[in-house]
Image (cartoon, rainbow, N blue to C red):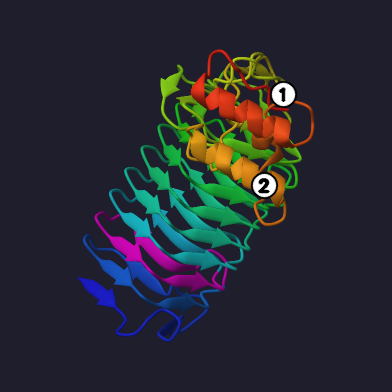
Amino acid sequence: MTIRSENCSATCIVDAANPGDHVFEVTANYVNISGFTIADATEYSKVGVYIDSVGHCNISDNIVSHNNLGIYLDNSSSNTITNNIANMNEDINIILSLSTLNTLINNTASYSGSGIYIPDSSYNMLLNNTVSENLYGIYMIHSCNNNLTGNIANANTGELGGIHLWNSNENKLTMNNVSNNSQYGIYLEDSSNNLIYNNYFNNTNNSFDDGTNIWNTTTTTGPYIVGGPFIGGNYWSDYIGIDNNSDGCGDTAYNVPGGTNKDHLPLVPMCGDLDGDCIVNIMDMRLLMMHVNDPDGYPVDSWAGNVDGSGGIGIVDVQLLLTHVFDPVGHALMCG
């Protein structure tokens, strides 16, 4: 069954008839709900879209707001939640409980107690969701074998911040951008055997881990999250090591606070890659030359343009980058 608005979510509003009722309660398989604003299930534990013990449902392109809980998958499997805006729900925007094999893609979850809460759920995929300005961003508890890829968790204000795993094992986190969370970027508590690599961390405190987890993968060819030829560990805004051979990985390990875990291949931005295409070539040299002539008209990142490591950007950097392009081995870059 498909329930779809004729217009769009901004103009087709479905309110709870009673604040003590769910707005949509789905108890059958293969139900599609699309294109609504779903609101006003405000009493405790009441939900905008409640998926109860069913599978193969598709919830897409909705605005789910001003409920106690936004979208709730309870004991449900093989559902797809995509392109929804779940915001300003009182307790939680999106929750997966006792649920497996679900896919959350391109959802926005903001302005709530928790953005996405995952208790006792496994084998779910979270792809390209934005979780921002909640108390807690993505909070996973007693959950294993989930995959978090390409999500943004930023500006969450709670004590444990952007991504929090508690007693959760064997999850994979990659290509996530975790920034500007007021306390921790990622916090792992009593959790082990999680694989965490190619993520971007820039927070007040980037990480905490009191378990045994893996913070880098084997060096693999492919662009990493801050540009460069190899995938290894993660980018850490507070990493103070250097990359003498310009392979995009720091020469010393990053110590993850909380225990003895290390990121053995911390990522550093690729020296000389001004246009961010993961290749240092003549186009980067031209951009650097234009920046030297007109800094305001052609801005560049200082870590990429200061190729001689002097602390400033000038004609010497242009000359060095040019010689490096034609002889990378003989003229190494020393970005500072």
User: Residue 249 in the image: x percent, y percent?
Assistant: 58, 21
Judge left or right: residue 269 versus residue 183: left
The answer to whether one can see residue 268 in this image is no
**Callout 1 amino acid:** Pro
Magenta span has 52?
yes
User: Residue 116 in the image: x percent, y percent?
Assistant: 52, 52
Q: Secondary structure at mark 2?
A: helix
Question: What residue does disc 1 label?
Answer: 257
The answer to whether one can see residue 102 in this image is yes
Quadrant (top left, top right, bottom left, bottom right) of the N terminus: bottom left
Judge left or right: residue 207 versus residue 272: right
Judge left or right: residue 206 versus residue 12: right
* 120, 247: nearer the viewer: 247
* 322, 41: nearer the viewer: 322
When the figure is inspected, residue 33 is found, relative to residue 73, above or below; the finding is: below
**Callout 2 amino acid:** His
* 251, 292: nearer the viewer: 292
Magenta span has 315?
no
Number of numbered discs overlaid on the protein picture: 2
Residue range highlighted in magenta:
43-67
When the figure is inspected, residue 85 is found, relative to residue 229, above or below; the finding is: below
Question: What residue does disc 2 label?
Answer: 291
